[in-house]
């Protein structure tokens, strides 16, 4: 008799993969020298990022700005695009219900990022309700796990010769998806297996995307899950890792890695890809934090040296919480009265710290250096 393969693949892309192997996968699939080497580099990079973030006196500064960039990049993977200016202006309005189009979808992603973070802080473990809440927030939907009769298939995108061709069919059937999701949740919550959290994150992400538990929004939910798993495991205090930046820069390799497992059982390429994503984006986020801190300190010194502005620390904190500031933000925060807030923002405009913009009849003040750092 032929030897049973280590990992059972999905031979027919047009049929539901109801034989998706449960977790955990066998150690032979990831115990590899290259993986261990990349794992060490990724752990060092994310450890350095965590160490730097702990030293930040005002983490809200980075929580707002970097999480917005993560939301924008993750949404772009799903072909939901907007400009930085549109996104930041929408965010500065502080009322998601009044925003339409791509900016609204991206801000919903960010809301899901923070909702899930708070959920796990309270529950301390993953469960089906966590995933359903993430999906509902992302898609603004009222349903949950897809019904057994939902004939969901994944098709090739683009306009090439294979556009529209079925490339994967997720599991389907009564209680099938729920049982597979329960297996994933058990794997993610199992602290006794001693598996490194970064390896577990990579494995879990593939399994979630293969299960494809919702009718839509699975890619975004899976990428949010990655960051939440890292914070839940204590690798980061806050979900500030800009992980989707690497995925969108290497989008073809991302999808090739997913299909490589289902079609060939190639877990090694996938895990190496995900570990490199953690390493690269940890280093990018670390540098962005350093650049923002240095710029913030320089602007604070400029204000003290060149102006008579009162409470400069509060003003600097406000203009670094998001790229676009309005007079209303400073007034609502109780920092200054309206006329004083306007005067001070105009003073920073003269110093070329801010750029004043009039858009649809409203005045906005753009923090030029913060916008540049985030856009790089």
Image (cartoon, helix red, strand yellow):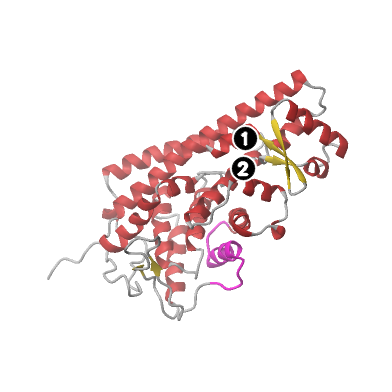
Q: Is 266 part of what is drawn in magenta?
A: no
Estimate the x, y position of residue 327 in percent, counting from the top left.
80, 41
Q: Identify the element where label 1 is drawn.
A: helix
Kind of element beneath mark 2: helix
The residue under label 2 is 65
Q: Look at the image and give the residue range highlighted in magenta.
A: 124-144
Q: Position of residue 298 (x, y in %)?
A: 66, 23
Position of residue 331 in the picture relative to residue 301 (left or right): right
- Gap in angstroms between the C-alphas marked 2 and 1: 9 Å
Residue 118, labelled with which disc?
A: none
Of labels 2 and 1, earlier in sequence is 2
Front: mark 2 or 1: 1
Question: Could you tell me if the residues under marks 2 and 1 are in contact, i.e. CB atoms within 8 Å?
Answer: yes
Quarter of the image where one finds residue 212: bottom left
- Specify whether 314 is left or right of 204: right
| Rendering coords of residue 58 (x, y %) | 67, 36
Of residues 242 and 120, the one nearer the viewer is 242
- Residue 309: in sight, yes or no? yes
Question: Who's the residue at 69% across and 27% down the image?
Answer: 352
Question: According to the image, label 1 marks what residue?
Answer: 370
Q: Is residue 142 magenta?
A: yes
**Percent x, y of residue 107:** 62, 54
Quarter of the figure with the N terminus: bottom left
Res 238 visible: no
Determine which quarter of the picture holds residue 15: bottom left
């Amino acid at each position: 008799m032929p030897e049973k393969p280590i990992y059972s693949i999905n031979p027919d892309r047009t049929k539901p993969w109801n034989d998706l192997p449960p977790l955990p996968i066998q150690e032979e699939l990831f115990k590899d020298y290259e993986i261990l080497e990349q794992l060490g580099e990724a752990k060092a990079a994310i450890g350095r990022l965590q160490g730097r973030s702990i030293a930040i006196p005002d983490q809200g500064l980075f929580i707002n700005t970097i999480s917005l960039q993560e939301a924008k990049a993750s949404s772009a993977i799903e072909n939901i695009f907007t400009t930085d200016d549109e996104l930041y202006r929408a965010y500065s309005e502080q009322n998601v219900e009044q925003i339409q189009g791509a900016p609204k979808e991206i801000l919903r992603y960010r809301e899901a990022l923070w909702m899930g973070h708070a959920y796990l802080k309270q529950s301390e473990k993953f469960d089906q309700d966590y995933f359903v809440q993430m999906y509902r927030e992302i898609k603004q939907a009222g349903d949950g796990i897809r019904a057994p009769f939902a004939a969901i298939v994944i098709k090739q995108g683009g306009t090439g010769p294979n556009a529209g061709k079925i490339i994967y069919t997720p599991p389907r059937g009564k209680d099938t998806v729920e049982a597979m999701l329960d297996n994933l949740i058990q794997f993610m919550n199992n602290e006794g297996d001693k598996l490194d959290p970064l390896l577990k994150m990579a494995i879990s992400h593939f399994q979630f995307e293969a299960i494809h538990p919702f009718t839509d929004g699975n890619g975004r939910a899976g990428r949010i899950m990655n960051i939440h798993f890292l914070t839940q495991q204590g690798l980061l205090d806050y979900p500030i890792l800009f992980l989707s930046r690497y995925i969108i820069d290497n989008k073809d390799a991302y999808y090739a890695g997913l299909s490589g497992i289902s079609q060939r059982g190639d877990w090694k390429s996938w895990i190496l890809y995900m570990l490199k994503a953690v390493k690269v984006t940890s280093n990018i986020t670390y540098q962005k934090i350093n650049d923002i801190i240095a710029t913030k300190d320089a602007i604070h010194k400029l204000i003290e040296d060149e102006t008579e502005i009162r409470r400069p620390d509060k003003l600097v904190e406000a203009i670094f919480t998001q790229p676009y500031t309005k007079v209303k933000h400073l007034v609502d925060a109780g920092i200054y009265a309206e006329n004083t807030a306007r005067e001070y923002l105009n003073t920073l405009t003269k110093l070329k710290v801010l750029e004043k913009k009039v858009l649809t009849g409203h005045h906005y003040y753009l923090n030029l250096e913060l916008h540049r750092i985030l856009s790089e």
